[in-house]
Image: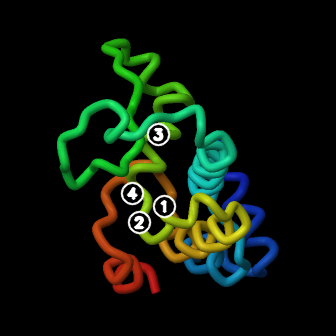
Amino acid sequence: MIFKIQKLIIRIIANSNYRTSCRDLFKKLNILPLQSQYILSLAMFVVGNFEEFSTNTDINSINTRQKSHLHPPSTRITKFQKGLHYMDVKIFNKLPPIIQHLSNNKKQFHKTLKKFLLLGSFYTLEEFYNWFSISELRADYL
């Protein structure tokens, strides 16, 4: 409901037809869709509280491709897996490595992540989880 209202407002600001796709309007107006704002907020929480999270290297010493990823809390309860403390780790791990490595500089991290989210203009978390490469985002959305 809130996302529909956000799209309505974007169309009003851009003086566009009610059938116009908002994805390009979000990019043009430099405004993040609701789910992209959610991703930005959770990722910034992780960066601001990085010492509270452990990496896969902290848990085991096996040298894997995901050794620098944050280790998600272990749980079998679906309700917890949909909660903030689980989702923020999942979202941070899905960010491009280039952005993850900027986590020690909050200002640069925020700026780069916002550009990335504007490029993708993700309407759902599934869209965010399923992107493969930045070049794919450009091909699909620009």
View extreme (right): residue: 13
Q: Earlier in the sequence, mark 1 or mark 4?
A: 1
CB-based contact (under 8 Å), mark 2 and mark 1: yes
Between the residue at mark 2 and the residue at mark 1, the CA separation in whole angstroms equals: 6 Å
Residue 96 — which label? 2
Q: Earlier in the sequence, mark 3 or mark 1?
A: 3
Amino acid found under the numbered disc labelled 1: Gln
Name the residue tied to disc 1.
Answer: 100
What residue lies at 35% left-to-right and 20% top-to-bottom?
Answer: 74
Amino acid found under the numbered disc labelled 3: Val
Kindly report which numbered mark, 2 or 1, lies closer to the viewer in this rendering: 1
In the shown orientation, is residue 128 left or right of residue 83? left
Q: Earlier in the sequence, mark 3 or mark 4?
A: 3
Q: Earlier in the sequence, mark 3 or mark 2?
A: 3
Between the residue at mark 3 and the residue at mark 4, the CA separation in whole angstroms equals: 17 Å
The N terminus: image quadrant = top right
Q: Earlier in the sequence, mark 2 or mark 4?
A: 2
Q: Which percent across, then down, holds residue 48?
A: 69, 46
Name the residue tied to disc 3.
Answer: 89
What residue lies at 60% left-to-right and 75% top-to-bottom?
Answer: 115
Q: Is residue 3 visible?
A: no
Between the residue at mark 1 and the residue at mark 4, the CA separation in whole angstroms equals: 19 Å
Residue 127 — which label? 4
